Image (cartoon, rainbow, N blue to C red):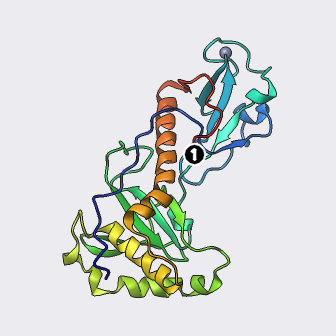
Amino acid sequence: MLPSMMMSPSIRLLRWYEFANCVMKKTKSPETCSGGPGVRMQFSGAGKPLIKFRHCERSIYSFSVPQCCPLCQGDMGSTRIEDAPISISDPFSNGHQEKCSFLLKPTRGTFLREYDGKSDLHVGLTNTRGVVYNYNEHGIQRDEAGWEQSLSVPLVQPSMFGLMDQWDKYLEDFSASPAWLPHRYEENHYNCSSFALTFINCILAMEGKEQLDKREFTEKYVVPRTRLASKYIMLYRAIQERGFHVADHPDPVTSPS
Ligand SMILES: [Zn+2]
């Protein structure tokens, strides 16, 4: 549709350089982290929530707060309030529950299990019922499953009723265009992100807003999420392997982003 929509190869997750805080929420009190039944927070995308706590002047990450510090074996019961456990939000969401959103996931497998930091990513757009429209070598796909662990960028403010009302029709009409026939697909230059970004730019044009090129879109909306996801994946796997993870830095309390 737009000749300027030449895409570079798939967006890739950034490598992260240090352990630092993800988006965190204070839990009410340490006893909610003692692993008792029914106190676990619900996370839509991944599996177990991650917890960060402090002991021995270090930040320690695990799936739940242990009875004893894994470093000094000391009792965890008497932590200071500033060292109280924090739960780390899962950056993933079930794409089929996200309306009018841009979604990213690994082309094969899931972020938490298979993603290695270099694997290709696939992107799509949801309609108001969570059907994921995406473009690949077989043409436009309308997926009702398979995007359960995605990174999601909402594209429509809840207050934009007019756009929300028409969204499904716009997306369906756009997808029916011959521009997205299978034979036009090219892995590096005319691919899933060409489809998604061209649609986003059509919407922006209708709204009288400025177009986004791929770099702008990636830097503004994708990179902050993939950066967070990389940290989370790394932490998750480290904890899965050893039961806990100790931050390299003495006190990475402030968020880098
Ligand atoms: Zn300790």
Q: Quadrant of residue 55?
A: top right
Residue drawn 36% across and 60% down? Answer: 122
Q: Quadrant of residue 25?
A: top right
- List the single residue furthest toward the left: 183
The verdict on label 1 being within 8 Å of ligand 1 is: no
Residue marked by disc 1: 257
The quarter of the rendered structure image containing the C terminus is top right
Residue drawn 50% across and 86% down? Answer: 206
Residue drawn 75% across and 40% down? Answer: 27
Q: How many marks?
A: 1
Residue 111 appearing in the image: yes
Is residue 222 rendered to the left or right of residue 178?
Answer: right
Given residues 226 and 95, the one toward you in this image is: 226
Residue 65 appearing in the image: no
Image spot of residue 245 (x, y percent): 54, 26
Given residues 77 and 250, the one toward you in this image is: 250
Which three-letter amino acid code belongs to the residue tagged 1? Ser
Is residue 167 positioned above or below 21 on the image?
A: below
SS at mark 1 in the image: loop
Image spot of residue 152 (x, y percent): 51, 61
The quarter of the rendered structure image containing the N terminus is bottom left
Given residues 160 and 148, the one toward you in this image is: 160
Residue drawn 51% across and 35% down? Answer: 235
Is residue 47 rendered to the left or right of residue 86?
Answer: left
Image spot of residue 136 (x, y percent): 29, 69
Image spot of residue 85 (x, y percent): 71, 32
Is residue 162 rendered to the left or right of residue 120?
Answer: right
Is residue 139 positioned above or below 117 on the image?
A: below
Is residue 7 positioned above or below 82 on the image?
A: below
Classify mark 1: residues with Cα within 10 Å, few (<14), some (14-19) or many (20+): few
> Which quadrant contains ligand 1?
top right
